[in-house]
Amino acid sequence: MDFRLTDAQLKQREEFFNVCKELEKEKPPELLTLLESSYSYESCWQFHLHCAKEFAKRGWLSLAWPAEYGGQGTMMDRVLFAEARGYYEIPGIDVFGVQIRTAQIAGLLFLLIQ
């Protein structure tokens, strides 16, 4: 089995890293940890929003969503994007996002049908 990234994946990974590297240059000094600092200081919150807008322009907020809901890319794209964001400690993604809400709704529906 070949676990190497394809040429297309390597190109996409490089783009993710390049954008995150550029965003890192604008990171406020108060941004110490993504989860806590992103919401604790106005400068960090504004940077979070700036990053989110940059990612939205590129269509990266909906990676691995189903196409019928506006998704594009693959789960591997999402993994590579998370790798780049983690490497440079870049916010811009709601850490709780759709996945946690989906699990909550599924759990609620399960309870309702019991």
Image (spheres, helix red, strand yellow):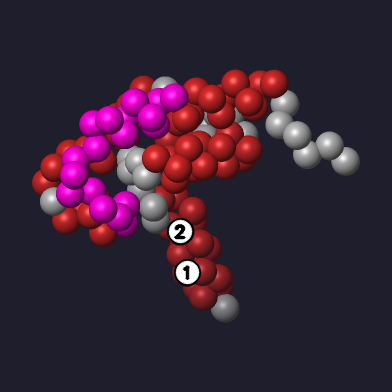
Q: Which residue is mark 1?
A: 108
Neighbourhood count class around disc 2 (C-alpha, 10 Å): few under 14, some 14–19, many 20 upward: few
* Callout 1: SS: helix
Which residue shows up at 43% across the image and 35% down it?
61
Q: Amino acid at mark 1?
A: Leu
Q: Residue furthest right?
A: 1
Which residue shows up at 37% across the image and 45% down it?
89
Q: Amino acid at mark 2?
A: Ile
Splitting the image into 4 quarters, where does residue 3 fall?
A: top right
Neighbourhood count class around disc 1 (C-alpha, 10 Å): few under 14, some 14–19, many 20 upward: few
- Find residue 7 and report its horizontal and vertical position in percent: 69, 21
Q: Is residue 76 left or right of residue 36?
A: right
**Above or below, comparing residue 16 to residue 65 in the picture:** above
- Return the mark for residue 93: none
Splitting the image into 4 quarters, where does residue 54 fall?
A: top left
Which residue shows up at 63% across the image and 26% down it?
10
Q: Which residue is mark 2?
A: 100
Q: Which residues are magenta?
A: 18-35
Quarter of the image with the N terminus is top right
Tag 1–tag 2 contact (CB < 8 Å): no
Give the total number of marks visible in the rendering: 2
- Find residue 31 and report its horizontal and vertical position in percent: 23, 48
**Above or below, comparing residue 36 to residue 76 in the picture:** below
Quarter of the image with the C terminus is bottom right
Which residue shows up at 66% across the image and 21% down it?
8
